[in-house]
Image: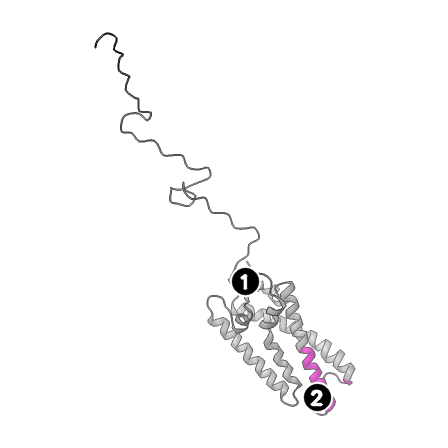
């Protein structure tokens, strides 16, 4: 080396040790667990907890809905008998609400009773569906009706899903109206039961499909 020539610089030191070594992997994010591809890993955040107050979304089964409807039917039968059978029809026509066909008074009482009964039944379901999302029977069985928007049904949706109850208005027809109306309601109920049983996904019968509603089991 000639005089005046600066010495060569020292070789660079590998910050990770010997040559050929690779840098250590970055530490996992706080709160994460598992590998890079697993839940909560390096590249995926941990799944959020379920919202507070969440309820189950299992569709209501046929047996549960049948018991709820039975409870409502018994309650409505008592209310209907008190209001229609004794108070209104008896006061107007001077009868005890009998449905015989012996005269014009009996026919008038039958016609009025058919109209009032239909109004009571539809009003009951419309009120509880739109304000509570469930009737008394559904409260007991922990069921609720959900409208198309995911909340309580609107009055239009409630009336659509219960429109088959208006078949009792056939009672205004003399002689055979009450019988025909009763048979028509029975057919509607059977079709509803068959529809619920055959729909394994949403348990919707024709009346729920008509109204775009469905019944859920809570919890």
Q: Is residue 38 visible?
A: yes
* Colour setting: one colour
Q: Residue tagged by mark 2?
A: 107
Q: Is residue 163 magenta?
A: no
Residue at the far left in the pictured view: 1
Spot occupied by residue 111 in the image (x, y as percentages of width and height):
69, 84
Mark 2 Cα-neighbour bin, 10 Å: few <14, some 14–19, many ≥20: many
Q: Position of residue 31 (x, y in %)?
A: 46, 39
- Magenta region: 93-117
Q: Nearer the viewer, residue 3 or 19?
A: 3
* Of residues 8 and 165, the one drawn nearer to the viewer in this rendering: 8
Q: CA distance from mark 1 to mark 2?
A: 43 Å
Say which residue label 1 marks: 217
Specify whether residue 135 is in view. no
Q: Dots 1 and 2: beta carbons under 8 Å?
A: no
Q: Is residue 170 above or below residue 63?
A: below
Tell me which label, 1 or 2, sits earlier in the chain: 2
Question: In this picture, is 124 found above or below 51?
Answer: below
Q: Residue furthest bottom?
A: 102
Where disc 1 sits, the SS reads strand
Q: Quadrant of residue 102?
A: bottom right
């Amino acid at each position: 080396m000639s005089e005046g020539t600066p010495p060569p610089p020292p070789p660079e030191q590998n910050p990770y040790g010997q040559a050929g070594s690779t840098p250590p992997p970055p530490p996992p994010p706080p709160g994460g667990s598992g590998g890079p591809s697993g839940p909560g890993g390096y590249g995926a955040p941990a799944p959020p907890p379920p919202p507070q107050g969440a309820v189950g979304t299992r569709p209501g089964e046929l047996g549960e809905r049948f018991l709820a409807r039975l409870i409502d039917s018994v309650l409505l039968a008592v209310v209907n008998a008190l209001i229609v059978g004794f108070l209104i029809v008896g006061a107007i026509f001077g009868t005890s609400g009998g449905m015989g066909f012996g005269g014009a008074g009996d026919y008038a009482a039958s016609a009025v009773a058919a109209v009032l009964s239909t109004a009571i039944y539809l009003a009951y379901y419309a009120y509880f569906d739109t304000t509570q999302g469930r009737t008394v029977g559904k409260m007991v069985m922990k069921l609720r009706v959900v409208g198309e928007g995911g909340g309580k049904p609107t009055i239009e949706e409630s009336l659509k899903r219960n429109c088959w109850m208006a078949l009792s208005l056939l009672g205004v027809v003399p002689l055979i109206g009450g019988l025909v109306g009763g048979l028509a309601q029975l057919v509607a109920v059977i079709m509803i039961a068959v529809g619920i049983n055959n729909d394994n996904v949403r348990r919707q019968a024709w009346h729920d499909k008509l109204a775009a509603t469905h019944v859920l089991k809570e919890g």
